[in-house]
Structures are given as C-alpha cells and as structure tokens.
Image (spheres, coloured by chain):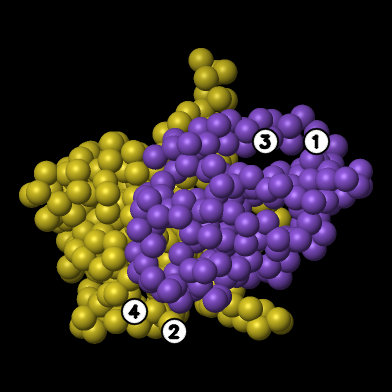
Chain colours: A yellow, B purple
Amino acid sequence: MRKKTYAMAALFAAAALTLSACGSGDDSNKPVADVSAEAGSGKAATVLDNPFEKPDLVLTDTTGKKYDLRARTKGRPTLVYFGYTHCPDVCPLTMNNLAVAKKQLPKTEQDKLRVVFVTTDPARDTPAALGTWLKGIDSDFIGLTGDFATIQAGARSLGITIEPTTKDKNGKVVSVHGTQVIAFSPKTDAGYVLYGEGATVDDYTKDLPKIAEGKTP
Amino acid sequence: MSRRPSRRAGLLAAGALVIAASGTLSGCGSDDSSSSSSAGPELKVTGAYMPAPSTDTMAAGFFTVTDSGGADTLTSVTSDLSDEVTMHATEDGTMREKESFAVPAEGTLDFASGGNHLMFAKLTHKPEQGEKVSVELHFAKSGTVRISMPVKSATYNPKTGH
C-alpha cells in the first residue's frame, strides 16, 4: 500500500515539474511534453485535481467586436490555447490537431464546442490577421486579441507563463506561446483537463467526445 | 559528452524514422565531396518534411542532419518557396531566431517539431500536401546540401508517420 502511495506521489511530482517548467527558459532542449509522456503512461490528458476557474477575459474577436470569454462560452465545452500566428510550428500544429479532432465529433457536438485561440502577440495579431490565419485552420475557431497585460494575466491564472514579443540584441524577434491546451467543462465551466505540446490529433480525437460532455477523458 | 549510449539511442531512433519515411525521401541523401578528409564532416540529411501550412504567409520545415565525421555548422538555408528562410530554436515555448546551428562531430542536429525549426516566410505560394519543396542547407565546411522536402498533412507526426 505504502509503496503504491509513493509511486503515485512520484508521478504527481513529475507532472508538477512539467508544469512549473513551462516558460522558464532554462537550458533543457527537450520539449516539456516528453517528460509528461514518460511519466503519464502514455496518456496525453492531465486531469486536474484543482480545476482552473475560467479566466475573466474580455478581448476583441476576429470581427473586431468585444468578446467576453466567460459569457460567450458559458455551459459549452471550451478549449483554450495561447499562441501567435507568426509561429510556424507548434501553434498551427496544435490548432490543426484540434480542428481535425473536432470534425470527428457528431455535428451537434461540433456546434457546441468552442475552440479559442488567444494571441500572445497582440501587436502583430490584429483581428484581421487572426481571422485570416484561423480561416486556414477552422473558420469556426474563435481568435482573440487585445491588451497584452490582460492576456498575460488571463494566461497566468491558468498556470501559463507568456512574455511580450521582444527583439533581442541582434534585432531578432523573440516570441512566446503557451505549451498547453486547457479544456473547460460544459457542466462546471472549470478548466479541468490539460494537454501538453505532445498531445496528438489521435489523443484529441479520443478525448473530445468525453470533454463535450464534461466527463473525465 | 559522456552520454554516448543515449546519443546512440537517438541515432537508432533517427534510423528507424528514416526507414519509415524512406518511401517519400528518395531525394534527401547528401553525396558530399568532403568525405575524403578523415577530420571532415560527413553529413546525411534525413526525415525532412513540411507540415502543410494554413496560409501562404508562413511554413515550418523539419529534418535531421547526421554527421559521421567531424563537426560542421549549418549557417543558412535557402529555398524556391521563400526568400526569407530563417532558423529558430524553441525552448519551453519561447521561439528565438538563431544565426547558425552546430552539427556535432559524430552526432546529430535535429530540427523537430517543438524544438528547432526552419521558418519560411512570405511564401511564393501555399504548398499543398504531396508537393515537394526544394531546400538548400548551407554548411560552413560541407557546402550546400540540397534536399527535397515533402509537404505532409498539417497534423503530421513523424513518430506515428501520419
């Protein structure tokens, strides 16, 4: 019994480590998701013991109109990701994974699901730029932009660290995207499941039917 | 440097990948002239792919350079698809452009999703899945290695091969 408890504790510690490492800019070359993949017995989803409250974000959508995240996604299964469109790798991969998985849900479930992409680079990601980019992925996805400090605070409330896009001493652009997708339950509106960068289209395809009903994947 | 077994494991994994992807990668090997010198780098580029981009503004590219000789440096990348090909390293979600990447002696340089990537900006057109993009990798010692980079699905995962 005791041994089991320790094993569980170790697992939990490993999971906690992967979370705290996000955005800390240390010298590890390996993607954070690799660690959780090893620790989590092949499961992409981390079900949170202490779910996140949905951030109180009021931003601007791709049509230039005000979008109140809590009000507009209330009672709907919602997936939130923080990224930017000048990101050729992980951001489009993550959003395309969600788009492909979504299309495998029954139509009624697809219509209920909200997928929200919040930019971490609002200076470059105008509503129009976000709209063009998301249209190439899934025209039903919601893109939000606005004041960076507001976005950063919203991300932080979900344990996601982002920094403003800056230029380094050589004039090269340095940008930051989140490494997690947070799933919010339609039942409680709480962020109860977290996916790391290693989550594949198959993982999302398998889990979305459960998330659509607020069940544990 | 002391972790030789793990590097070998990485090489084996890369080898497995090559086999898995070999059907589409016929044009990817590099036959370089530098092999005569024992201290010179001996490069091989494998596993190249480009996820189909969402727009014509930006695309990523991935590949592995395996060096069975001395060290080299990847100094720049060019392509017909874009006049602006840059090299980036991503660490914990932070993407930084880099001027060059070291190719370690008897080691590998990986450009893999979530880590290092090529960034093609302002594309001449939006490449579709099934297309091949011509890419030239320029190395300090080995010179130019031309590869044919197949365009895969936007959700392509080299680990699963789909």
Q: Tell me the element at label 2.
A: loop
Q: Quadrant of residue B5?
A: top right
For label 3, the residue is B10
Amino acid type assigned to the residue bearing label 4 in the image? Ala
What residue is rendered at 19% in x and 43% in y? A104
Q: Is residue A40 visible?
A: no
What residue is rendered at 55% in x and 32% in y? B19
Residue B152 is left or right of residue A60, and the answer is right
Amino acid type assigned to the residue bearing label 3 in the image? Gly
- On residue A123, which mark appears? 2
- On residue B3, which mark appears? 1
Q: For mark 1, name the chain.
A: B
Residue B150 position (above or below residue A156)? above
Q: Position of residue B97 (x, y in %)?
A: 63, 70
- On residue A129, which mark appears? 4
Q: What whole-number distance in Å separates the C-alpha atoms at marks 3 and 1?
A: 11 Å
Q: What whole-number distance in Å separates the C-alpha atoms at marks 1 and 2?
A: 43 Å
Q: Position of residue A119 (x, y in %)?
A: 39, 72
Q: Are marks 3 and 1 on the same chain?
A: yes
Q: Position of residue A88 (x, y in %)?
A: 47, 64
Q: For mark 4, name the chain.
A: A
Residue B8 position (above or below residue A29)? above
Q: Tell me the element at label 3.
A: helix
Q: Is residue B78 visible?
A: yes
Amino acid type assigned to the residue bearing label 2 in the image? Ala
Q: Residues within 10 Å of mark 1 (few under 14, many from 20)?
A: few
